[in-house]
Image: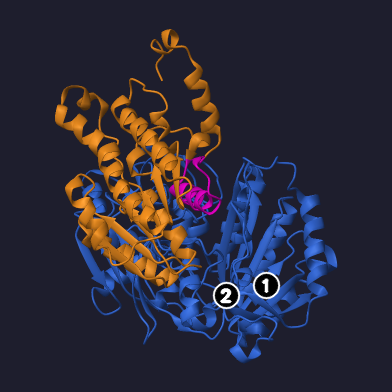
Chain colours: A orange, B blue
Amino acid sequence: MTASGVLILGANSDIARAVAHVYGAAGYPLMLAGRAPERFAPDMSDLHLRYGVPVTVHGFDVLETDSHAAFVANLPVLPDIVICAVGLLGIQAQAETDADHMSLVLRSNLEGPASALSQFAAAFEDRGSGVLVGISSVAGERGRASNYTYGAAKAGFTAFLSGLRNRLAGKGVHVVTVLPGYVATRMTEGMALPALLTAQPEDVARAIRLAVDTQRNIVHVRPIWAVIMGVIRLIPEPLFKRMKL
Amino acid sequence: MTQAELTGWGRFRPVATVLHTPRTAPEVATLLQSANPAIARGNGLAYGDSAVSSGYTISTRRMNRMLHFEPEHGLLEVECGVTLADIAAAMLPRGWFPPVLPGSGAVTVGGAIAADVHGKNHVHTGSFRGCVVWMDVMDKNGRVRRCSSTVQPDLFDHTLGGMGLTGVILAACLRLAPVETGWICQEQVTTSNFRHTVAELRAARAAPYAVAWLDGLTTGASFGRGVVMKGHHARYDDLPATLGSRTPRDAPSTRLRFDWPKWVLNTTSMRAFNALYFYRASKRTAPQLVDWRSFFFPLDAIDLWPRAYGSRGLLQFQCVLPHDTAEPGLEHILRATQEARCPPFLAVLKELGMQESAFSFPMPGLTLALDFPASPAALKVLDRLDAIVIENGGRVYLAKDARLKAGILRQSDPRADTFAAYRSEQGLDAHFQSAQSKRVQI
């Protein structure tokens, strides 16, 4: 139990909702941030009724990077933990020809989250405490034809989190990189995902809490994904480029 | 949208369906324009094919928010996918509790309304209907109608017990019951034979909650022996200081992660299990305090417990017989299963009281629920049990059913025809269908 709160960026996603429930159940005050925050009213009552914790909502647009400094400065309290659950899968085929769509995918998954987390990093560094959690993706481990725009953005985000962790080590601020693998969410609805490799949003949320509590740096929600991606990274490029993955 | 093979809780006969998991009411409305025929599904706790459609199945498990609580009168507004155990857990610290709880806490509010579930207190409180102040039902055009016993009472009547066939139940307001603690004072007696079990259960009527477990495997003099349990909510003053808290701490539940081999549960192993259960109950006759989850949802302690039955799945049969035929009729049913060498692995007996509504299961009498490992022999026995139910003027519970034939439903329950007529009159029959509604033709 703690008095300081958890801020969730992109609070409308299935993973974000699950994270809110895990931290709410543990007694943390919750701050839900996202576009059109009036949408969060039902979640706000739900979390408050279930767990009796204070819940506040905050308007936040990850793409409006100019506003991020003010967003952090104007928060009523600086949270202890910030969890960035923002993400956009996009449509790979569209990104190949439509520059706006490619830019949207890159900005939603890399530029926007990196900008927001930078602002929190500075504030946390000043305070000398805090945890930053970025939900990245195994898609960033190696670019594949089926989703390399998303993968490129996530690769960048993973590298960003790694650098941020490096910078903040020894300054009281911890950075967690989460690599969920397949998750049964709205983002993946309709895809035929193998059950053994697919986590539920609730699994991701529990893995995040555990990683924060135990100060882990990089977490796979399902350990099998560490093995799979380890193998995929080892495939020589001349062979890899001919594979359909 | 996902292609899926879904079953009910008994994991019997998968149905190929297109599964949607909407997050909001407008998403459901959009879905209903094209998803046709469709049926809503909560947590899939109906044992058979009530909540799966060969067309579209609309899962409500991501529409599970508690929306508003009015503490003065204990009125709670929830989305349909909220589970009853979650309501109990959230509201106990405020001194409120769901007045009607079925045998699993994972049942959603939508499911509880659709099956108009009953608990161990039906004689006193009636079915789930009694705690529904109003509910929102979405029709095929995406229009939401709020109904109650006084506003649009026809829709209210037919939706309670209507097995999701009157539209998608989106939200409801429930009237909770005030309680002092989440602990139940439980007393149990062991009984030596079927007649004794029935007599003890009827004698337990004065208790707020009463239920009997039966040993369906014993024959001869101890045929139908059992354990009759009764309980009431402990008052705060009843709690010993060592217990400390008004709200019990949640015990972690375990989960069966795979199907057990079929040979693990068989009549011999179940006979041993029942003997042990009976013996332990006989040593524990003094009143004891048990937490609400253990009392109301003993099976929830092991998530996905039907996997113990293996890949064959399990069939449940639940019927109610009116008081004047209940005792001989239910004895006949139990003996018929034994004569066919297909005895139930689990048997639960309860008393039911008065019931209003158009198509709900309960009637004054005794209800018996039996679990069987699925097999051709079990299916044959269940047909035989249907006939005994009809002879005795009873009816079967659709929430438990995976195999009832259309003609049999009509013979046992003339309300099936009026319910089907209401559906066609309202233009609901083409849009809202489950595998079960097609099978039993309602």
- Element class at badge 2: loop
Q: Which of the 4 image quadrants contains residue B294?
A: bottom right
Q: Where is residue A18 in the image (x, y as percent from the top left)?
A: 42, 54
> What's the distance in space between the residues labelled 1 and 2, CA to CA?
10 Å
Q: Is A204 within the magenta? A: yes
Q: Position of residue B338 (x, y in %)?
A: 74, 56
Tell me the crowding category of disc 1: few under 14, some 14 to 19, or many 20 or more residues within 10 angstroms, Cα based. many
Q: Position of residue B263 (x, y in %)?
A: 74, 42
Q: Mark 1 points at which residue?
A: B212
Q: What's the residue at 43%, 80% (across, down)?
A: B176
> Left or right of B312: which side holds B8?
left
Point out the tag, 1 or 2, that comes first from the N-terminus: 2
**What's drawn in magenta, residue-wise?**
A199-221
Q: Which of the 4 image quadrants contains residue B25?
A: bottom left
Q: Numbered disc 2: what chain?
A: B
Q: Name the residue under label 2.
A: B120
Between A23 and B135, the residue placed more toward the observer is: A23
Q: Can residue A61 be seen in this view?
A: yes
Q: What residue type is labelled 1?
A: Ala
Q: Do the residues labelled 1 and 2 touch (CB within 8 Å)?
A: no
The answer to whether B294 is drawn above or below residue A153 in the figure is below
Q: In which quarter of the image is the C terminus of chain B?
A: bottom left
- Element class at badge 1: strand
